[in-house]
Image: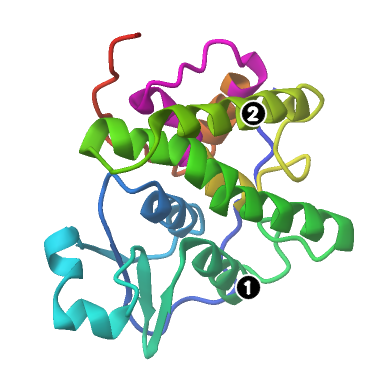
Amino acid sequence: MPIATPTVTPTAMPTAEIVLHGTELSGHAHRVELLLRMLDLPFRFVAAPAGVRSTPEFYELNPLRQIPVLQDGDLTLADSNAILVYLAKRYAPGSRWLPEEPLVAAQVQRWLSIAAGQLMYGPATARMIVQWNFPSDLARAKQIAAVLLRFMDEHLKTRKFLAAEHATIADLACYSYVAHAPEGGIPLDPYAAVLAWLGRVEALPHFKPIPPSPIPAAS
């Protein structure tokens, strides 16, 4: 059965170069890159590792020194979820990426909040601890991830995508850190519905994966 996709030709094309500052392993940057690709928007990716983010030049882009940062002509915008909303409204207004229907719009916002909350403090934090020795509580991150993944699995047993019957920016916001949860020592095998959803996102046109990182041995 074909995957329902909201991919559309942008109704507005950029008048200046779009630049995305991030790193190739950042799930926050990856969610923005996915939407740029799925909207078929030309852009330039600029690597912004920790050393770059500590410079005065990057401080001018984002005083919080976080990635991603999007530049679109004279506009500079930080925060991955804010960037997703901007791109959908600016380049695909009225599309199914960010629906106008009140209930669906509310559902999208709910999952953007989950992406910034449980997803960040669960799977994303576990991955940072395991891969880059991020100073945090791995057991706590895994506990948050387990609650989230059980919830997502039940939610996805009766639907194809998170917020609607088609892909939205909610799916892009949540995909990367769920897909790479095993890199934080969180197996996905128990969550069949989540795995099926990941496959549907990966089947969307212009999808590009994050390069894999080592999966730790089971403890």
Residue 146: % across, % down: 58, 25
Q: Residues within 10 Å of mark 2 (few under 14, many from 20)?
A: few
Q: Residue 56 in the image: state x and y as whole percent.
A: 16, 83
Q: Earlier in the sequence, mark 1 or mark 2?
A: 1
Please give the count of numbered marks on the rendered protein: 2
Residue that badge 1 annotates: 89
Residue under pointer 2? 147
The residue depicted at 63 percent of the width and 32 percent of the height is 148
| Quarter that holds the N terminus | top right
Identify the coloring: rainbow
When asked about the image quadrant of residue 88, the answer is bottom right
Label 2 residue SS: helix
At 72% from the left and 53% from the top, the residue drawn is: 110
Span highlighted in magenta in the image = 176-194
* Camera-side residue of 139 and 175: 139
Task: State whether residue 188 is above or below residue 165.
Answer: above
Locate residue 4 relative to residue 189 in the image: left or right.
right
With 32 as the anchor, is 100 left or right in this view?
right
The residue located at (54%, 38%) in the rendering is 204
Residue 54 vs 8, above or below: the answer is below
Q: Quadrant of the C terminus?
A: top left
Q: Locate residue 54, reporting x and y percent.
A: 16, 71
Q: Amino acid at mark 2?
A: Val
Q: Is any atom of residue 2 visible in this view?
A: no
Assess whether residue 156 is covered by the magenta stretch.
Answer: no
